[in-house]
Image (tube, rainbow, N blue to C red):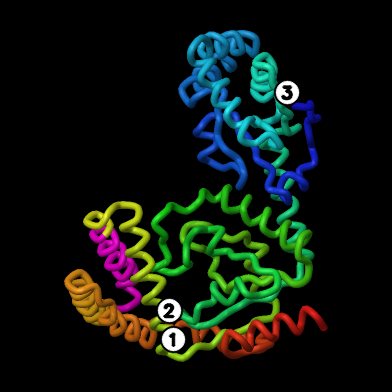
């Protein structure tokens, strides 16, 4: 394999989804990394902890010496094998550590000793993260945004994907943005969410161009917080309001939050445990908004939901769920949304069914 130079072309790495080998410890990777990064650590968490203490107490040279003692023999051989597998799978990739210093250069040297030249990212994680933070702030300030709004259940995310240049905030946060919005797989860390968002915004600007379309969200999408500057911009830009008849909204919610969620839980956990976890997900989502519903309304909805779950388990029929979905929309979500929309009327540029929204977006792009 021909040798490639080390890089500091951070933009190209992110725009082209270049594979990245993160040689930091697992605890650092879990705290936050990048969409195309895989963790193949030089040291595990315990080894890194011990070397860190040694560095503070006895200096760099003794710390390096301890690191070599801890990562030696079979342990070193296993780490090198993991790196070789990554390199074989991703010959176009790069490796990085925290600052592009000791750990990445040592990894690079050990791989080279095994007969493979593999380049690193200059400045490491810290430089890549700084680049994304600065890029995101710049793009939030300079980009042209359009916001897709609409009542709960209108299928905003489905319509967003049909617009010319979408950035799916709920997809990036792995959460649908409501009490019922939890997914079967966990949400990313806040740092991972911010990094994903920055990369998506870079791609939307460099690959597609034109206005960036976002779904109307509150500050928190699950536990992932939108940058304050983005939330502020979203409150000022043109608003598109998606409308759907009640029957269609109920069907969308039943499909997304009942049928698809049960399928996801059973795919992950098997039929029996999957059903129990789905059952718990639905009831606990309702319980989370108990205070806002009020005790009596919450009890009524819980009774309806429990009956629907019993019928679904008995016969597979999901239609009984329509009753609590309708009641929740009419008595809780719609009044809340209608009040919020009344505060934004001056920003509405188009209002209507999915085809009306999509046609308007395409026409405004071409005009």
Q: Residue 281: give x, y in percent of width and height.
A: 31, 63
Label 3 neighbour load within 10 Å: few <14, some 14-19, many 20+:
some
Which residue position holds label 2? 252
How much space separates mark 3 and mark 2, taking CA atoms? 52 Å
Picture residue at 57% right of the left edge, 23% below the top: 42
Q: Residue 242: give x, y in percent of width and height.
A: 57, 84
Picture residue at 22% right of the left edge, 56% below the top: 272
Q: Residue 210: give x, y in percent of width and height.
A: 78, 71
Label 1 neighbour load within 10 Å: few <14, some 14-19, many 20+:
few
How much space separates mark 1 and mark 2, taking CA atoms? 6 Å
Q: Does the CB distance between marks 1 and 2 fall below 8 Å?
A: yes
Q: Secondary structure at mark 3?
A: loop
What residue range appears in magenta?
275-294
Q: In the image, is 290 to the left or to the right of 129?
A: left
Q: Secondary structure at mark 1?
A: helix
Q: Is residue 172 above or below residue 328?
A: above
Question: Is tag 3's residue or tag 2's residue first in the polypeptide sequence?
Answer: 3
Residue 74 belongs to the span the image colors magenta: no
- Which quarter of the figure is the N terminus placed in? top right
Which residue position holds label 3? 117
Q: Secondary structure at mark 2?
A: helix
Q: Is residue 328 above or below residue 143?
A: below
Q: Nearer the viewer, mark 3 or mark 2?
A: 3
Which residue position holds label 1? 248
Q: Nearer the viewer, mark 3 or mark 1?
A: 3
Q: Residue 302: give x, y in percent of width and height.
A: 23, 75
Residue 279 belongs to the span the image colors magenta: yes
């Amino acid at each position: 394999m021909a040798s490639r130079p080390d890089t500091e072309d951070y933009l190209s790495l992110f725009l082209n989804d270049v594979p990245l080998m993160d040689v930091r410890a697992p605890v650092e990777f879990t705290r936050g990394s990048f969409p195309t990064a895989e963790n193949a650590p030089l040291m595990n968490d315990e080894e890194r902890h011990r070397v860190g203490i040694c560095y503070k107490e006895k200096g760099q040279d003794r710390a390096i010496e301890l690191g070599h003692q801890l990562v030696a023999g079979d342990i070193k051989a296993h780490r090198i094998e993991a790196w070789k597998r990554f390199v074989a799978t991703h010959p176009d990739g790069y490796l990085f550590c925290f600052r592009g210093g000791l750990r990445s250069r040592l990894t690079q040297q050990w791989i080279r000793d095994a007969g493979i030249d593999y380049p690193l990212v200059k400045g490491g994680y810290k430089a890549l993260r700084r680049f994304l933070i600065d890029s995101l702030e710049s793009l939030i300030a300079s980009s042209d945004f359009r916001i897709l709004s609409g009542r709960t259940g209108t299928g905003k995310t489905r319509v967003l994907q049909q617009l010319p240049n979408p950035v799916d905030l709920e997809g990036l946060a792995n959460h649908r943005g409501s009490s019922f919005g939890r997914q079967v797989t966990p949400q990313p860390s806040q740092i991972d969410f911010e990094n994903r968002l920055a990369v998506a915004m870079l791609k939307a600007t460099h690959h597609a161009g034109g206005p960036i379309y976002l779904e109307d969200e509150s500050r928190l999408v699950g536990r992932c917080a939108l940058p304050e500057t983005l939330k502020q911009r979203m409150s000022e830009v043109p608003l598109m309001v998606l409308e759907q008849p009640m029957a269609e909204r109920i069907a969308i919610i039943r499909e997304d939050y009942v049928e698809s969620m049960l399928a996801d839980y059973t795919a992950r956990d098997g039929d029996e445990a999957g059903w129990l976890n789905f059952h718990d997900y639905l009831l606990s989502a309702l319980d989370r908004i108990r205070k806002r519903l009020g005790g009596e309304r919450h009890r009524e909805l819980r009774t309806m939901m429990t009956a629907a779950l019993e019928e679904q388990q008995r016969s597979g029929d999901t239609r009984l769920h329509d009753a609590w979905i309708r009641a929740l929309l009419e008595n809780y979500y719609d009044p809340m949304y209608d009040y919020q929309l009344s505060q934004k009327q001056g920003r509405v540029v188009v209002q209507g069914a999915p085809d009306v929204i999509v046609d308007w977006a395409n026409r405004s792009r071409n005009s």
